[in-house]
Image: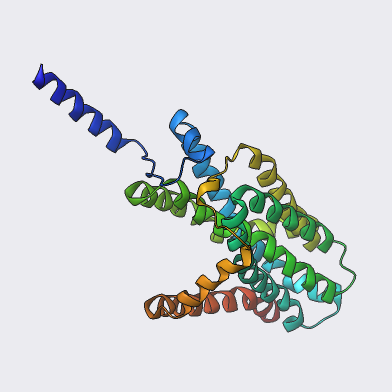
Amino acid sequence: MEEGQTQKNTLSAVEGASAPGLPEQARGDSPMSEKLRADGRYYWFLVAYLVVLSALDSFVNDMYTPSLPAMTRFFHCSVPTVQMGLTMGMVGLAVGQFLLGPLSDRYGRRPVLIGSVALFIAAAAVSVFSPTIQFFVACRLFQGIGASGGYFLARTIPADVYSGRPLARLMALTGAVNGIAPASAPVAGGLAADAWGWKGVFVVLAAFAVLVLLLSPLMKESLPEGRRTQGKWWKAMSGYGRLLRNRPFMIHVCFKGTALGFLFAYISSSPTSRNDTA
């Protein structure tokens, strides 16, 4: 009898180790945690949706770079001026994460996700009708803010419902699949630009974001009310000060920021330099 009970406990432990585990939550369970427990297939939907969210960040900057020479001719402006669109997109990504992060901690992930994607769709659609390069650059700022929601939530949502090895497994899986996005975005942008011009690129981006928005009702809330920050949402920004004083963290940030700076300098200059050489 005792031996049979031991074998049953061992089998249960092995099954639990092989399945995606849920973290122990101090203050209740989120709707997403309950859904993941009830339906094993929802885990793969979560993986796919997180990949799409992360890809939106890569597409917002990389996809329209092949159109830079055509945009200089359309707006009758210099190359550095049209490259400001890339700069403002990056500024929007930074500002958006800075502001939307505390908002999602206070009000939950889903409202911020839906609002940020809707903002991106609106900014991408309006940019198609830009009368001047200055108006287009302003639209790029709001596109970056909108895309930032998907960028940081794709990394925050997994930490809400998983921890330890299950979290590492999920992040590694989404990261491996999402590695295709930075390489495929310029190719997709070039094909769209050849077919429909530079405006077509932003129509495709808006359509991609619409797909993300249409799937958002299937995303359950990952942050239960008991774990949300209390009081005014902007008070959570005090945590940024502690991060700035964390020397190992800031060294890592500086290294990664420098690497990304070189990468985007190459991305933004390669279409125009090849065009001049030709």
Q: Is residue 101 visible?
A: yes
Quadrant location of residue 83? bottom right
Query: Taking 175 as reference, is 63 left or right?
Result: right
Q: Dividing the picture into quarters, in which one does residue 27 lie?
A: top left
81 or 174: which is nearer to us?
174
**Residue 197 visible in this rendered orientation of the protein:** no
The x and y percentages for residue 242 are 46, 75
Residue extending farthest to the top is: 1
In percent of width and height, residue 215 lies at 65, 40
Hey, which quadrant is residue 269 in on the image? bottom right
Tell me what residue is drawn at x 55 percent, y 59 percent.
152
Locate the N terminus and report the quarter of the image it occupies. top left
Nearest the viewer among 44 and 161 is 161
Classify residue 45 as left or right of residue 247: right
Q: Residue at x 50, y 33 (%)?
A: 35
Which residue shows up at 77% across the image and 54% down it? 203
Between 12 and 138, the one lying in front of the other is 12
235 versus 172 height, above or below: below
Q: Report the quarter where the C terminus lies.
A: bottom right
The residue lying at 78 percent from left, 67 percent from top is: 139
When the figure is inspected, residue 256 is found, relative to residue 196, above or below; the finding is below
How many numbered callouts? 0
Position in image of residue 44 (x %, y %) = 48, 38
Where is residue 148? Give x, y as percent: 62, 62
Residue furthest to the front in view is 231
Display coloring: rainbow
